[in-house]
Image (cartoon, rainbow, N blue to C red):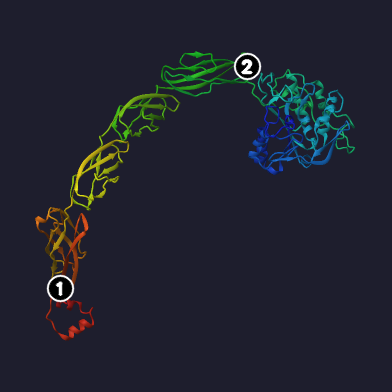
Amino acid sequence: MIKVNLNNCWQNPYGEEDNDADANPYLVKELLDQLVNVVGVDEENITVYDAVRTMANWFYNPLASDFPDVNYVDYRGGASGRQKVTSSGIKIYFTNEMDRTLPLCVTQAKYLINMPIMKRHTLGSGVTLAGKNHFGSFMTSPSGLHTYHLSAFTEGNPAPQTDIHAHEHIGGKTLLYIADGLYGSPVNHVSFGHFDMYPFNDDWANSLFFSQDGVAIDSVMWDFLNVEGDPAEGSQNYLHQSADPPADVYDPEGDGTYLNESLGVHEHWNTTIDIFSSDRYSGPAGDGIDYIAVGEVDLEADANGPYNGVVNISIQFYGNASGGTTPYTWYWEFGDGNTSTEQNPPYTYSTTGNYTATLTVTDDYNATANDTASVHVEPELEADANGPYDGTICEPIEFSGSASGGASPYKWYWRFGDGGTSTQQYPSHQYDDTGNYTVKLTVTDDWGYTDDDVTWAIVTCNELEADANGPYEGYYVGADVKFNGSATGGCEPYSWLWDFGDGKKSDEEDPTHQYMDAGNYTVTLTVTDDVGYIDDDVTWANISDLVPDLECEGTLSWSKVKPGETVSGSFTVKNIGDNGSLLDWKITKWSLWGSNWAFTPRGGDDLKPSDGSVTVNVSVKAPNEKNKEFTGEVKIVNKENTSDNCTIPVYLKTPKNKSSNFNFNLLEWLFERFPNTFPILRYMLGL
């Protein structure tokens, strides 16, 4: 069980936040981390509680984020993850004849950890420390105890804190007291405040208190608060009652067994002895508090080096000190003969080199402390953009950055003047428009120093040129006219737009188009490059209504051809169409047998009827097979009308390589009956 102090939460909504002096969730979180991750306590075996206050989200969320299985108990249980406190039926009986019922989580706990806050209560109500922290360990509001609490300010009167310390389920189970004085409150139980006393010197208390003695820890915190202003002298009476209880007064269990033994050690410190000294209290030898202070007494200076910089640029120095007595005075020696009395002086070295800077700190009692820091000064950083640069649009320009001085490695940042940037030392950048661009390189060295260099890039353009590759002639109505577009310059990729002059268009690079009427058509190709430049080229297409007609004559026939022998032949091609028509023809197919087929010519253009026949000479190497016949055809087509075609039949026969007059019936019968026998004899006989 961990008892925290959420006194100022009252019945606040869970989502409400304030700056009141309540438990610090991050200190509780550190305790949970020790218990769970160091000691090995299971989360579900730990409970954090305040039985009479709400556990607001600002307190709960930081804990539950890392320790969701811990039990979080408050008086309402009205928010996610928070359990409502339940009654155990077990009471604590106060000496003034009042009683309070204890929560089940307290009576079932094996051990308790009490986490009070070092704070003064409202004027006249004393202090809120470890003893009073358990006013939040009952099933009902502690307000009814306040009269009893105030009556205990009279020396010798019984005190409720002593009843609590003595109860077997509260003080009897408390294993450890951890008091939060990181900020503390010398003002009241609500508001945090600075402590004027040494060593805090009008700053936060910055202290934690640890003890297994609930009387001793409250005694020490009472002394701290008393220095800041009397917290009411009678408020320490409960410490006297707990350290030296009167006989037969306190019976918190109501079982007739009275407290007759001391609950702890109570004494006040000796203000003539240094606050960090173990002699501040009398210690075990004097049956007093064993006071172990952890803090800094001696003055220490910190020059916060090393420092690095470049010549002619200011280096920022930072001085710190601890211990001693404020205020401090500062004295810097920079190692080149110059000095400063500022705490954090800027200083500029005019020469490169290695220097030792010395900081001397003097406190308010003239105690001094020194610290040194090394200073390394490099030559001044210089960036070089290495321009000027020139290039063309759509072709990357290679930039080259360099630097000297400062401290490598360097970082690079280019601005190319067209909105583009790069963090490479040697970037490649492409411009989309011509012009003169201002290029800026910023170099940052490893110490954060920067330098700029400005150059320029002159960007020109390779002029875009479209080529329609015309004119297109020799075509007739209904024939496929194959247009061929090309372009140079500008920026690829290009887009294409053909206007065929007959109202039809195409966005292909190499379109095919059919004209339905004869005529001479103006054809325009418009090319647009990737950045919007445009160029046109104009040509024409001459379309005739005179239709050619293909005719082929001849055969290709070869007999008794030795296997592998090359043979030759010919056939003719003729335009028998309309006078004035032009025939474009080509050979598109021939037999797959044989090899080295050759046709001279293989095709032709603009063949007129008046030109007569064209002889096509053919040669082919016969297949290397004996006694075989091969057939096929050669196909010739009108290139402008593939349905206009003709074929030339092809025939080739290879006989046996050798003939034999051998007519011996028995051998013939054997060769026929056993075709795979006598291979040598067969070879000699040519069979």
The answer to which quarter of the image holds residue 563 is bottom left
Tell which tag, 1 or 2, sits nearer the viewer: 1
Q: Quadrant of the N terminus?
A: top right
Q: What element carries label 1?
A: loop
Q: What element carries label 2?
A: loop
**Is residue 34 left or right of 507 when viewed as pictured?**
right
Q: Where is residue 312 in the image (x, y as percent from the top left)?
A: 42, 18
Which residue is denoted by mark 1 in the rendering? 655
Which residue is denoted by mark 2 in the rendering? 326
Q: Check if mark 1's residue and mark 2's residue have beta carbons within 8 Å.
A: no
Using the image, determine if residue 46 lies above or below residue 181: below
Q: Earlier in the sequence, mark 1 or mark 2?
A: 2
Q: What residue type is labelled 2?
A: Thr
Toward the viewer: 92 or 601? 601
Q: How many marks?
A: 2
Q: Where is residue 169 in the image (x, y as percent from the top left)?
A: 80, 38
The answer to which quarter of the image holds residue 348 is top left
Q: Which amino acid does label 1 sit on?
A: Pro
Q: Which residue lies furthest to the front in this view?
A: 517
Q: Examine the rendering and report whether any part of residue 405 can be seen.
A: no
Mark 2 closeness class: few <14, some 14–19, many ≥20 residues within 10 Å: some
Using the image, determine if residue 636 lies above or below residue 273: below
Q: In which quarter of the image is the C terminus?
A: bottom left
The answer to which quarter of the image holds residue 116 is top right
Q: Examine the rendering and report whether any part of residue 135 can be seen.
A: yes
Toward the viewer: 517 or 93? 517
